[in-house]
Amino acid sequence: MTRILLYSDEPILAKGLESVLRQAEGFELLPTCNSVTGLMEQVAEGAPDLVLMDLTPEVTFAVLSDMKHAMMSSKIVLWVNNISTELAFQAMGLGVRGILRKTLPTDLQVKCLQKVQAGELWFEKALTDSFLCARRVALTQREGQLVSLLSQGLKNKEIATTLMISEGTVKVYLSRLFQKVGVKDRFELALFGLKNLTTGQLPVAEKGHRAGASPMPGLRSLVLEKPMDRAEAPTRFPTPVRPMVSRHY
């Protein structure tokens, strides 16, 4: 019996999926969580086999990273309306096993969870195709930490204090990152960092944490979906449904 834990802040939508999963064979549905804090508490009580996470504004790269460390034996599937190429790529790198579109027919919703539990991956072709158009910039551990802190709105002095390095060293790292990523200033670099770290559903000022808060984990790479002079938008899945990309882990 597959134990499934659902997290969603949309109660009506969650009730509908609960009804579908209760009718599907082989699933045991655990009490649904409506906050990330509740989700982490539930996981601490006993690791489920599958965690289906609604992509709410609370679900960031940092949250996904913490989740993977907290439940190494559980498989995570993101439940989305849309997701940026950048965050999807980072989620895959963290070990998320599937990205499930909410608007899929119920039989495909169930099929996705069955496939993932059987050891396969579930990512739609529209999403994996978007990775082919993306540019990946590898980051060192220190560069990843700096981009994460910069994306929270921290100034050079605050970044230096957090990383326990000099303000001059921060300036050197930033100058190198501007050239490496191909950006003009810290604002552009921070925007790319945010697209890789967050869902983009809240204003930047409401996402960031000032000095003294727990820093986001450092990125191992930056994914740049489109040329910098063009607007970037989350991947929106086409209709009708295209073939799935599903392979053994």
Image (cartoon, rainbow, N blue to C red):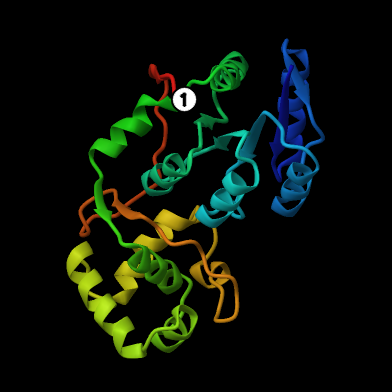
Q: Is residue 233 left or right of residue 82?
A: left
Q: Residue 8 occupies which quadrant of the picture?
A: top right
| Image coordinates for residue 196, horizontal then vertical, percent | 40, 55
**Image vertical order of residue 44 relative to residue 20, above or below:** below
| Image coordinates for residue 183, horizontal then vertical, percent | 22, 68
| Image coordinates for residue 151, horizontal then vertical, percent | 43, 69
Residues packed near mark 1 inside 10 Å, few (<14), some (14 to 19) or many (20 plus): many
Q: For this rendering, which residue is in front, 146 or 128? A: 146
Q: Residue 211 occupies which quadrant of the picture?
A: bottom right
Point 36% across, 88% down: residue: 166
User: How many discs mark residues in the rendered view?
Assistant: 1
Q: Residue 51 occupies which quadrant of the picture?
A: top right
Q: Is residue 227 left or right of residue 116?
A: left
Residue 182 visible in the displayed image = no
Q: For this rendering, which residue is in front, 105 or 246? A: 246
**Image vertical order of residue 54 relative to residue 41, above or below:** above
Residue 144 visible in the displayed image = yes
Q: Is residue 36 left or right of residue 199?
A: right
The residue singled out by tag 1 in the image is 121
In the picture as drawn, the residue positioned furthest to the top comes out as: 25
Point 59% across, 52% down: residue: 66
| Image coordinates for residue 41, horizontal then vertical, percent | 78, 49
Point 49% across, 56% down: residue: 198
Quadrant of the frame with the C terminus? top left
Quadrant of the frame with the N terminus? top right
Q: For this rendering, which residue is in front, 28 or 32? A: 28
Q: For this rendering, which residue is in front, 123 or 26? A: 26
Q: Is residue 66 left or right of residue 92?
A: right
Under circle 1, the secondary element is: loop
Q: Amino acid at mark 1?
A: Leu
